[in-house]
Structures are given as structure tokens and as C-alpha cells.
Amino acid sequence: MKAFAANTKFYQEGMDLRDYFAAKALPVLMHADSKPWEGHHEIHAEQAYKFADAMMKAREKKDD
């Protein structure tokens, strides 16, 4: 599923909704960390995708 519609003039596929959700969660996770730039990049990325997966799951339940 895409977060944005494809650009029809210059065809682009658009961003995946899961990636969009992860991108939105990442700044919050980094802000909550007292030392966000000290080797925690992989941890933040993994946590962001866990949030994104939870949002995708919640979205599926809403559509039922």
C-alpha cells in the first residue's frame, strides 16, 4: 500500500505506507532518547518499524 498517490506526469510509485509510518515515528523515538546520536541508529530504525507495523495492524482492524 502506498502513502501517496503515484505521480502520473512523471510516473513514480510513491512511498510505502509502512515506510511513511516509520518515518513519522523515528523523530519521536530519537527525541525520547537522551543520547540519540551515540550509536543508536539501528535501534531507532528497528523501533520505528515496530511502531509502523503496529499502525499497519491497527489500520487493518479498522478496515474490517
Image (cartoon, rainbow, N blue to C red):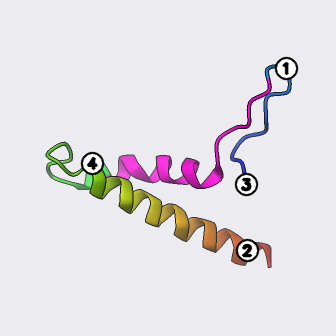
Is 3 on the left or on the right of 32, as rendered?
Answer: right
The residue labelled by disc 1 is 9
The residue shown at (62%, 73%) is 57
Q: Which of the 4 image quarters holds residue 4?
A: top right
Q: Is residue 41 left or right of residue 18?
A: left
For the residue carrying disc 2, how many other residues have a C-alpha within 10 Å: few (<14), some (14-19), or many (20+)? few
Please give the range of residues in magenta.
11-29
Residue kind at label 2, given as amino acid type: Lys
- According to the image, label 3 marks what residue? 1
Marks 3 and 1, how far apart at CA: 20 Å
The first of marks 3 and 1 along the sequence is 3
- Is the residue under label 3 in contact with that under label 2 (CB below 8 Å)? no
Tell me if label 3 and label 4 are in contact, CB under 8 Å.
Answer: no
**Residue wearing tag 4:** 41
Indicate the secondary structure of the residue bearing disc 4: helix
Q: Main secondary structure of the magenta part?
A: helix
Q: What residue did someone put label 2 on?
A: 62
Left-right relation of 46 to 13: left
**Which of pointers 1 and 2 lies earlier in the amino acid sequence?**
1
